[in-house]
Image: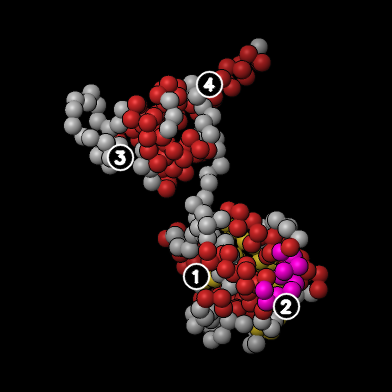
């Protein structure tokens, strides 16, 4: 009896998923304007929007397949079919993402790195005044930061281009405020370079990312050695020592969170009651320094 109940529940779940995808496709088809798709607007139409035949033609699939998708009888369309349907129905980026999620597929990226900080992430910077927070793109170029990040690392507002890129600075310039033990340095470099390689797969059409890697490969032998090893990974967390010129060293946990837009939100935190926590509190009072170093 338990197996029977489970089977019924599993079947219902599968049908619900297909129905959700079908309802979404029907809704987007009914909403679509034939003129936007380059189709003649004249002639009698039983309903607003595109006909199934028109969607099938625009997407390069059969009419029968469109019918089966809308009726929930075809529930695993390929990435290519989903991309073609999204284009045919003129879906927004968020609608396209929702289409892929309904079909149980990973959402493909556009090929170029996002560089705009969403209002929600911007509010996060404002609402964490006691935590240094920086927002980076997938290539580790700093985009936004809060006052305590600037107080900890030095104010980056006067820096431009490569000077705001963590990986570039690490491999091409003298050490800044972040101090690494030999073990930490090896671990950080491997993680950062692996992270960049993963980013090239995710954003294959981003010229800025490719340029950064080409230049780093040409000027830094340690980077070139790691890059040519073809490791792939992600930089997600570390313990870092920041040598501040006024309050002294701070041993902090560094955690990297990924936003929905593909950005990296980096938070520096200290254990409650620790010396580092006391020094972070003092930095809130002292304010920012002029140079990010």
Q: Which residue is mark 3?
A: 37
Q: For the residue labelled by badge 4, is the local secondary structure a helix, a strand or a loop? A: helix
Alpha carbon distance from label 4 to label 3:
36 Å
N-terminal of the two: label 1 or label 2? 1
Q: Left or right: 137 with respect to 33?
A: right
Magenta highlight on residue 24: no
Mark closer to the observer (3, 2): 3
Tag shown at residue 179: 2
Q: CA distance from mark 1 to mark 2?
A: 23 Å
Q: Which residue is mark 1?
A: 144
Q: Earlier in the sequence, mark 4 or mark 3?
A: 4
Badges 3 and 2: C-beta atoms under 8 Å apart? no
Quick check: is 223 in the magenta stretch?
Answer: yes
For marks 1 and 4, give the CA distance: 46 Å
Give the mark nearer the N terminus: 4 vs 2. 4
Residue 115 marker: none
Among numbered discs 1 and 4, the one appearing first in the sequence: 4
Secondary element type, mark 1: strand
The local crowd at label 1, few if under 14, some if 14 to 19, many if 20 or more residues have their Cα within 10 Å, is some
Tell me the residue at 51%/27% (across/down). Answer: 75
**Residue at the extreme right:** 183
In whole angstroms, how far apart are the C-alphas of marks 3 and 1?
39 Å
Residue 12: give its label: 4
Answer with mark 3 or mark 2, whichever residue precedes in sequence. 3
Query: Which stretch is magenta?
Result: 218-227
User: Where is residue 131, by image quadrant?
Assistant: bottom right
Task: Please provide percent x and percent y for residue 14.
Answer: 54, 24
């Amino acid at each position: 009896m338990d197996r029977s109940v489970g089977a019924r529940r599993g079947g219902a779940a599968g049908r619900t998923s297909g129905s959700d995808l079908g309802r979404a496709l029907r809704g987007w088809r009914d909403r679509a304007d034939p003129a936007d798709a380059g189709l003649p607007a004249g002639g009698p139409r039983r309903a607003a929007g595109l006909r199934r035949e028109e969607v099938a033609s625009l997407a390069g699939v059969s009419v029968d397949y469109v019918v089966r998708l809308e009726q929930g009888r075809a529930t695993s369309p390929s990435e290519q079919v989903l991309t073609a349907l999204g284009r045919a129905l003129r879906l927004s980026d968020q609608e396209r993402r929702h289409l892929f999620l309904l079909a149980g597929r990973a959402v493909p990226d556009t090929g170029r790195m996002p560089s705009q900080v969403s209002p929600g992430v911007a509010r996060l910077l404002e609402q964490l005044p006691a935590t240094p927070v920086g927002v980076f793109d997938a290539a580790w170029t700093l985009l936004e930061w809060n006052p305590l990040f600037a107080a900890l690392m030095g104010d980056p507002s006067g820096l431009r281009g490569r000077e705001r890129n963590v990986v570039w600075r690490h491999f091409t310039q003298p050490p800044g405020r972040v101090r690494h033990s030999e073990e930490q340095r090896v671990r950080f470099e491997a993680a950062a370079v692996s992270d960049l390689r993963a980013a090239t797969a995710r954003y294959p059409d981003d010229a800025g990312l490719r340029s950064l890697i080409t230049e780093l490969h040409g000027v830094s032998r340690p980077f070139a050695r790691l890059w040519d090893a073809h490791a792939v990974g992600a930089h997600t967390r570390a313990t870092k020592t920041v040598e501040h010129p006024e309050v002294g060293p701070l041993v902090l946990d560094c955690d990297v969170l990924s936003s929905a837009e593909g950005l990296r939100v980096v938070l520096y935190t200290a254990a409650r009651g620790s010396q580092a926590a006391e020094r972070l509190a003092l930095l809130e009072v002292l304010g920012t320094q002029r140079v990010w170093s």
